[in-house]
Image (cartoon, helix red, strand yellow):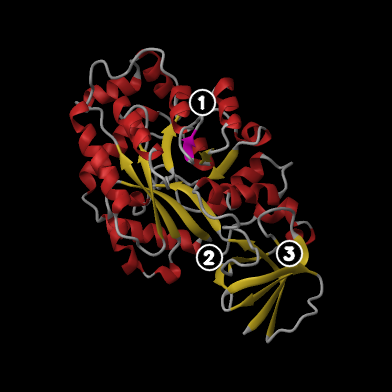
Amino acid sequence: MRSVYRASWLYCGDGPPLAEGYVVVELGRIVEVGQGTFSGEADEVTNLTGYALLPQLVNVHTHLEFSLLEKPIEPRDRFADWIQSVVKWRRQSGGDVLEAVQAGLKESFASGVGTIGEIATSDWHRDFEGFGQAETPGIVVFRELLGLNPDAIETQLEVARKHLADRPVEGVRLGLSPHAPYSVHPELFHRLVDFVAAMPQQPVVAMHLAESPAELQLLRSGDGPLADMLKEFGVWQEGVFQFETRPLDYLRQLARLDRSIVVHGNYLDEEELQFLADHQQLSVAYCPRTHAAMGHPTHPWREMLRRGINVALGTDSRASNPDLSVWEELRLLAALAPDMAASELLNLATVNGARALGLEPGAASITAGHPAHVLVVPLSSAAIADPEATLFKTPLVAGCMRKLA
């Protein structure tokens, strides 16, 4: 069956929108995209006047195990204290990880997300086939690795090996995530990079980096709020943090790999920004609402884009964010950057995210040859007249994700 869907506006994900655009679909796959009058043959034509068609969104960074939280964990404006609160919550919650993950996947799908970059502390992905993927986003599962104890290095490397050797699960890709400089022994980090670099087909690696001033202080001088936190938890290791280390040292290692994601990158300096620009295999995961709630200075995402750095959007988790809506991240960006067109912002939540996660070219876009998974978004009268200026001024209607046939 050959079906045509016509909309007031069509965002393909790789440029400005097409007025009166159409998508031709056969057997659930897009075979043609165009503008104006469709002159070919079709079994069915659906007119979506007053709507825009958009690619499914990509949430490049989250932690689904926190998805049952009704509100974020505090204090979000004091990073080390917040980390302590998160760790204590995790130890005390005793919650069902699978239940939380399923809730997060359901929420994500309802808010238009088609692909997720998930940081996982367990192997729940093995049960993914039972989650009902017809209404579940695809996932890149980054297995979290951490530990400052040198005696645990071999154990963590074995966790990485087993994760990547898992049997294939439909809808799941596998990656690795050495958590952060303050929680990963430098030898573990370097050996993990060596391990991945030697693989003929490398997984994507994601790492929290340059997230807070406390992290920079710990790397620079081995003291400060994060050092105090590690000592309070009883995991401090003398001699682990060498003086005068900086995020650039980690970037140089990550750049040895085919594709890596710098999660947050809130406090990268000029030299580090230029390093990112010079190494296109590195992407940055920017989580706007979490960034704002943490009280950080303005994120350099616009400067990153200006330099050609691949910036993709994430929500982070419900431990720092009230929900998992990438659309709400876009709405905040639209308010922060009213001079930027909606199509420019949409790139951060579609094609840029797909690139960061190592997906095939054309993923998270409306292009011929790809599955017809789209968002059908009702437009206000203002958005019908000028979607580039007003698309993200209104909330997303639940249930907008459609699989066209």
Q: Main secondary structure of the magenta part?
A: strand
Which of the marked residues, 2 or 1, is nearer the chain's N terminus? 1
- The residue wearing badge 1 is 267
Q: Tag 3, which secondary structure?
A: strand
For residue 9, which numbered disc appears in the image? 3
Q: Is 121 or 277 nearer to us in this picture?
A: 277
Q: Nearer the viewer, mark 2 or mark 3?
A: 3
Residue range highlighted in magenta: 260-264
At a point 36% along the width and 53% down the height, the residue shown is 67
| Viewport quadrant of the C terminus | bottom right
Q: Position of residue 382 (x, y in %)?
A: 76, 59
Q: Is 164 or 25 nearer to us in this picture?
A: 164
- The residue wearing badge 2 is 398
> Callout 3, which amino acid?
Trp
Residue 68 falls inside the magenta stretch: no
At a point 46% along the width and 54% down the height, the residue shown is 116
Give how far apart the Cα atoms at labels 3 and 1 are: 38 Å
| Residue 236 quadrant | top left
Q: Tag 2, which secondary structure?
A: loop
> Residue 73, can we see it?
no
User: Is 330 situated left or right of 231 in this image?
Assistant: right
For residue 193, which numbered disc appears in the image? none
Q: Position of residue 384 (x, y in %)?
A: 76, 63
Which of the marked residues, 2 or 3, is nearer the chain's N terminus? 3
At a point 26% along the width and 15% down the height, the residue shown is 239
Q: Residues within 10 Å of mark 2 (few under 14, many from 20)?
A: few
Which of the marked residues, 3 or 1, is nearer the chain's N terminus? 3
At a point 37% along the width and 32% down the height, the residue shown is 180
